[in-house]
Amino acid sequence: MKYVYKYAALMLALLLCLTALWGCGTKLPDQQPEGEETSDQQEQTDGEQQNEQPQLLSDTISCCDGDTTLRFERNAEGTWDWKDDTTFPLDNTYVQELLTTIEQMLTLQPITTDKTPEDLDLDEEEKYVTATDEKGYAMTWYLGKQDENGCYYMCLKGDESGAVYLAPAQLTEQISRSIFDMMILPELPVIPVANAKSVTITTAEKTVTTVPNSSGVWVVGISSVNEKAQPMLQALSTMTLATCVDFRPTSTAPSYCGLDPVKVTVAVEYLSTTGVESSFTMEIGNARSDGYCVRIGEDETIYLMSTQLIDPILAFIR
């Protein structure tokens, strides 16, 4: 009986030793306080943050080329307006191009230079681009001198590190555009030569009306003017506007552009492509290096039309 007790005690002691040895040879999972990250998790998070690109969901954009400041704002429909006059027919393509450049600027890396902001004219703050989100958070980039390759130096307002960047090549051209170059121009009516019924041209000295006779020859009275009329009719059939000269012009602008008094008025009676009797009126003013100032119908906006389209009309009246 004593032997049995001794054997049982020996087996129990052996079991306890094996249990202790097994526990010492097994690594328990690491424990960490709740809410703390392991080094692997932290490295993964840091890597994700490094791969993320900064974002600025612009609600307004302002830019200045040193002379003219333009301001754009996103409206309730999500499109862009010229802030100075929201009725201006703004071609959003131009603003989207500028916005794309701004997004590109968010990813730029600083350049190495031993020059100070003062050396690069970055302290003058004359040329800039500012993007502001709907919460009022704004980022402003100032442009300074050009480098030897024609790229502009640029810095970020409020950046205490003094980092200097090279602006994207297209930025200076984008912020130097005239607002009038960003206008959606009205489409002029299509006046097929065969559909024209009469053309009346008025100057300060005279008024001339030409019509096609029964043979299709254009005449003034009984005199044929077909040779001069055909180039004019071709020009009238392909009319397009080149750009806007002045939107909502001041009282002195028409005089400056040769439209007060009007130099030449052209009135055309024609059948539209759908067979509707229609009329078209255009006032022609002063010549510029790239065309003539014109007004269309009752629209007070002053536009530019190419010399190639206006010259045949003026040649007819001479």
Image (spheres, rainbow, N blue to C red):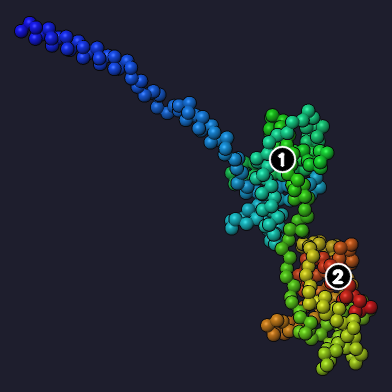
Does label 2 or label 1 sit earlier along the sequence? 1
Percent position of residue 5, x then y:
10, 8
Q: Closest to the observer: 7 or 147?
A: 7
Question: What amino acid is found at the position of numbered circle 2 in the picture?
Answer: Gln
Q: Is the residue 227 above or below the residue 296 in the image?
A: below
Question: What amino acid is found at the position of numbered circle 1 in the picture?
Answer: Trp
Percent position of residue 149, x then y:
81, 41
Give me the residue at 77% from left, 53% from top. Answer: 177
Percent position of residue 270, x then y:
76, 83
Give me the residue at 81% from left, 77% from top. Answer: 236
On screen, residue 250 versus residue 25, left or right, reads right
Residue 15 at least partly seen: yes
Q: In which quadrant will I find the N terminus?
A: top left
Q: Which mark is residue 141?
A: 1
Callout 2: SS: helix
Q: Which mark is residue 308?
A: 2
Callout 1: SS: strand
Please state which of the two labelled residues, at mark 2 or mark 1, is closer to the viewer.
2
Q: Is the residue 286 above or below the residue 31 in the image?
A: below
